[in-house]
Amino acid sequence: MKAKSKTWFVAGMAFAVAFVAKSDIATPSVSNVTMTQGETSRKVTVTYTLSDAPAIITLDVLTNGVSIGQENVWSLAGDVNKVVQNGSDTKAITWHPDKSWPDHKFGAGVVSAKVTAWAVNDPPMYLAVNLLQTGDVKYYTCAEAVPGGVTNNIYKTGSILMRRIYAKGIPWLMGSAGNEVGHMAREIQHEVTLTNDYYVGVYELTQKQWYYVTGESNRAFFNNTADWAERPIENVSFAMLRMNNYDNNTVQTAYAYPAEPYSGSFLGLLRTKSGGLKFDMPSVAQWEYACRAGNGDGKWGDGSLILATEAEDANLNGLGRYKRNGGSNGAQGVAAADGGTSKVGTYRSSDWGLYDMHGNVYEFCLDGWDASNGYGAGILISRMCIRKGASYADDPFACRSAFYTSADLNVCYPAVGIRLAITLQ
């Protein structure tokens, strides 16, 4: 929909208002936009009407048609950064520029408030779930718009931050070429095209996040008092994450994908706490596509070359914890932060802003393990699932995007955790 605008004057300052409906699927419509600023305060109020369909509303602020930067528009409240229901009532957004854009004044130029309506099935790039308040879900257009920045510790403890992966209809090569350093015969290279975009966790799920969802603490192997909260959760099983408890001699199929997770499982509890978001584990293909971050054969997720198989890899040293850069020092359950797992986000991100995709802990995937080729058995007929990403105890060959191995659904491993996903429909 083409942007429309309306201009008026408040307190001697010229304001322009633009509104945009973004989607080729649904058609939410924004109208009756106003923008005012208090005469004695810097608080700005934007009002609008949303018609035709619910939408996720975001706000940008421009001066003379140029954005002031989304990192300066994070102190927002009201009907913004969330799903807003359509109707004839007036919606309101408040912005405190003195908090997010201090020491700046609008001056004599035109100040624009751009209100964007995103269809609920075509959401913005980032999603954040507040674990301290049921149903508190926020959306942000880019990394710069995330309050406090994506590296803020809140997204490793009291909130879960997800990044949208644009994958629908894009062909890519899964597996590895025969000449890739560390290549294994089962990593058969084949073309894959995913049918949906999806969200994936910016970080591996942490022990503090596990606590806020389940109320359970000290489950992880590396749980020392000083820094347990931001270390990844591990020592959990696939069954605990998605299924109900069952004996080790029987394969439980009632809560296997594509069925809904058991309501009392971690994923069931998280779905309830988030207000119904369809949290799950990623499929193997979703995981590998996200890990590659657009990089092809022979490269890590930041585009650097894979250098080693069972020795130190200088490029991997900056991307994650593995055997050769401190991981092998983690022999005790109360290991210090310089041994065993590292706090999530300690190392640099991939080209898509994802952390710890290589090393730290393996991550469970939805797919079942087939002994003949590793793929295709499905959870329904197999007691083994696939795990990817390698861990603090592994050499570089296992940390590659293409590498995968098996895990028993019932076993709790001190080197296996989870990275969450939500498939968009």
Image: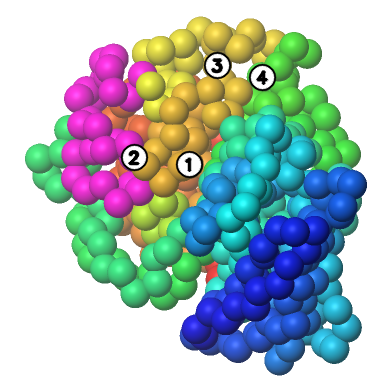
Residue that appears at 33% across and 24% down = 316
**Mark 3 / mark 4, whichever is N-terminal:** 4
Q: Extreme left residue here?
A: 179
416 horizontally vs 297: left or right: right
Residue 207: percent from left, percent from top: 72, 32
Q: Which residue is mark 3?
A: 340
Label 3 – label 4 distance at C-alpha = 7 Å
Mark toward the viewer: 3 or 1: 1
Q: Please, what is the three-letter code of the amino acid marked with disc 2?
A: Gly
Q: Is residue 360 above or below residue 93?
A: above
Q: Which mark is residue 301?
A: 2
Q: Which residue is mark 4?
A: 222
What secondary structure is marked by label 2?
loop
Looking at this view, is 24 or 80 the one in front? Answer: 80
Prevailing secondary structure of the magenta residues: loop
347 horizontally vs 279: left or right: left
Label 4 – label 1 distance at C-alpha = 22 Å
Mark toward the viewer: 2 or 3: 2
Is mark 3 in CB contact (under 8 Å) with mark 1? no
Looking at this view, is 279 or 415 the one in front? Answer: 279
Residue that appears at 34% across and 74% down = 169
Q: Please, what is the three-letter code of the amino acid marked with disc 1?
A: Leu
234 horizontally vs 284: left or right: right
**Mark 4 / mark 1, whichever is N-terminal:** 4
Mark toward the viewer: 4 or 1: 1
Q: For residue 89, which quarter of the picture?
A: bottom right
Range of the magenta residues?
A: 292-317
